[in-house]
Amino acid sequence: MRAVGIWPNPEKEQVRGLVRDLSRWLAARGVAVWCPPELGEWAGLESAVRPVADWRAAEFVVVLGGDGTLLRAAKELSGQGRPLLGVNLGHLGFLTEVEVPDVYAALAEFLEGRYVLDERMMLEATVRRHGTEVARFQALNDVVVTKGPFARLVDLEAYVDGSFVTTYRGDGLILSTPTGSTAYSLSAGGPVVNPNLRVVLLTPICPHSFFDRSVVIGDGSTVQVRVRTEHRDTLLTVDGQQGFQLEDADEVAVVRAAVPVALVRRPGWNFYHVLRGWQKGRS
């Protein structure tokens, strides 16, 4: 039997009813619905509960929320290889594909195979302390090493493939994918990068230095960031959703993740059209 995953954002008011309606609509077309255990129970669809580790047979996963929900789903489902269809319930997003009023018409086309896949690279960050791995994360947007709200400036030594680049002294350093170039990196003065490119951006945050421009490196490189700080208020944040406290001499190694994320798009989707819509929404 065909199956589609549904990943809802439980903080959105209208989501519970939408999940049930989608489930009935898909069932009428011979398509089973799978939900993560905690979210399926929240939506009252206990029969649809299925551990995400078993979602490899799903045709795609419908993510109901916004860019933040899609970022969360991408990390939780990393390695599954299932395409994600973002349904926007919030503000204009760069990652979501359809609005709620269009979801059934779009799904009807997608179930017939009329869609394209927009592949996005992810990052994998590993934290080592005294030579031992203490944490590992996946990111679709960015990995950020930053000082806490009340801390002094932090010194961050940056290396690419073992070669020393510079010591960034400031509020922090953003390591971003092309997808994340329109997120935190953009607000810190970084460039907008077409997501078809395979690069990593190093963008300093409020640097106390003349070396304040983003550095663009190839996705085959390893970036290492070594923390030099006298205080314990330095953090690693991942896609703005996960945090990990760093200590002096900790090393954060960032590489391209082995498995990318595929986003379901309607034929003719164009990144620059989304950019224009985003700019219009801000003006």
Image: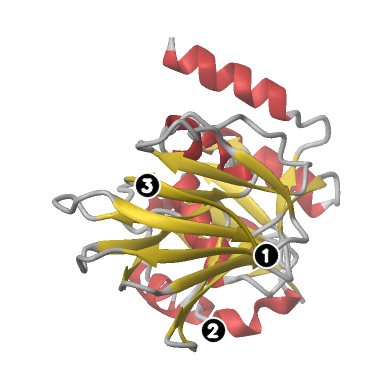
Nearest to N terminus: mark 1 or mark 3: 3
Res 227 quadrant in image: bottom left
Task: Look at the image and tell me whether residue 90 can be seen.
Answer: yes
Q: Residue 12 at what x, y percent from top left?
A: 33, 49
The span from disc 2 to disc 3 (Cα, nearest Å) is: 44 Å
Q: Residue at x 60, y 37 (%)?
A: 98
Does dot 3 land on a helix, a strand or a loop?
A: strand
Q: Nearer the viewer, mark 1 or mark 3?
A: 3
The N terminus - image quarter: bottom right
Q: Residue at x 13, y 51 (%)?
A: 150
Q: Residue at x 53, y 57 (%)?
A: 158
The residue that mark 2 highlights is: 51
Q: Nearer the viewer, mark 2 or mark 3?
A: 3
Q: Is residue 215 left or right of residue 46?
A: right
The C terminus - image quarter: top left
Does dot 1 land on a helix, a strand or a loop?
A: loop
Nearest to N terminus: mark 1 or mark 2: 2
Res 188 quadrant in image: top left
Q: Give the colouring mode of the picture.
A: secondary structure
Q: Residues within 10 Å of mark 1 (few under 14, many from 20)?
A: some
Q: Hey, what amino acid is under mark 3?
A: Arg
* Residues tagged 1 and 3 counted as in contact (Cβ below 8 A): no
Disc number at residue 169? 3
Q: Residues within 10 Å of mark 3 (few under 14, many from 20)?
A: many
The residue that mark 1 highlights is: 222
Q: Residue 95 at what x, y percent from top left?
A: 59, 42
Does dot 2 land on a helix, a strand or a loop?
A: loop
Q: Residue 57 at what x, y percent from top left?
A: 75, 77
The residue lying toward the viewer, choosing from 183 and 279, is 183
